[in-house]
Image (cartoon, rainbow, N blue to C red):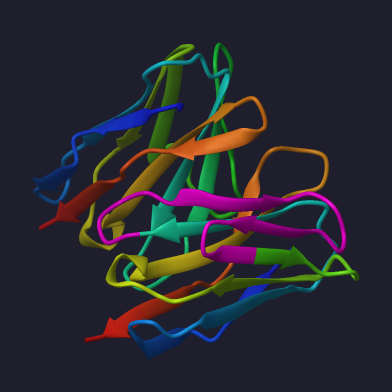
Amino acid sequence: GAVVSQHPSRVICKSGTSVKIECRSLDFQATTMFWYRQFPKQSLMLMATSNEGSKATYEQGVEKDKFLINHASLTLSTLTVTSAHPEDSSFYICSARSRDEQFFGPGTRLTVL
Amino acid sequence: GQQLNQSPQSMFIQEGEDVSMNCTSSSIFNTWLWYKQEPGEGPVLLIALYKAGELTSNGRLTAQFGITRKDSFLNISASIPSDVGIYFCAGPHFGNEKLTFGTGTRLTIIP
């Protein structure tokens, strides 16, 4: 089956620093990947759609300058949380589409001190 | 926007019991998806439903796509400890691949 990986699995950073999260499709190519955020005991909320070779499209209320997305190849999308603050602490999950199904990564737990 | 409400919010059951949860929408969906998420992991697809009225099984799991296309249910028979997790329904937005996730049902199995 299609496998999606994320790196790192967890990261702790100081307030004001930037953090990069990688999402890779391991055995398939994905022109479209998605980034979600999940706060404790809540559902997954779509943040943005990452398109290979073009700009990401962001959901309403998500700051594109704060959450930078780069889909540099057909197997890699990165999400950079710039100038992170404690309220950005969350579980970030990516997904990649293969045929008619979205496959989800294992998530990245971000803690901002 | 589209909202998916799940009930119950949480369930505490004993091993061996059957489980039933449902998902309702304020608008019509053409596809219903049921996912399971375990702690610290991403969601994994359990069942996909593509046609109104469709009833689909995957082992001990059974899901149905409501006739009105605004609801779906998921049943788990003879629950076992590894069924513990959060179950989400989800559906794609019209005309694109973006998914809206439901509010989730947290399943806990009492020993």
> What residue lies at 55% left-to-right and 64% top-to-bottom?
B61
| Coordinates of residue A42 in the picture (x, y in percent) | 42, 70
Closer-to-camera residue (A94/B71): B71
Quarter holding the N terminus of chain A is top left
Q: How many marks?
A: 0
| Coordinates of residue A103 in the picture (x, y in percent) | 49, 36
Which quarter of the figure has residue B64?
Answer: bottom right
Closer-to-camera residue (A15/B59): B59
Q: Is residue B23 magenta?
A: no
Q: Where is A69 relative to B1, above or below?
A: above
In magenta, the rendered stretch is B38-62
Could you tell me if residue B1 is visible in this image? Answer: no
Answer with left or right where residue A108 lies relative to residue A24. left
> What residue lies at 31% left-to-right and 45% top-to-bottom?
A107
| Coordinates of residue B38 in the picture (x, y in percent) | 32, 60
> What residue lies at 40% left-to-right and 39% top-to-bottom?
A67
Could you tell me if residue A21 is visible in this image? Answer: yes
> What residue lies at 55% left-to-right and 11% top-to-bottom?
A53
Answer with left or right where residue B107 lies relative to residue B51. left
Answer with left or right where residue B61 lies relative to residue B68. left
| Coordinates of residue A95 in the picture (x, y in percent) | 47, 37
Q: Is residue B50 magenta?
A: yes
Quarter holding the C terminus of chain A is bottom left
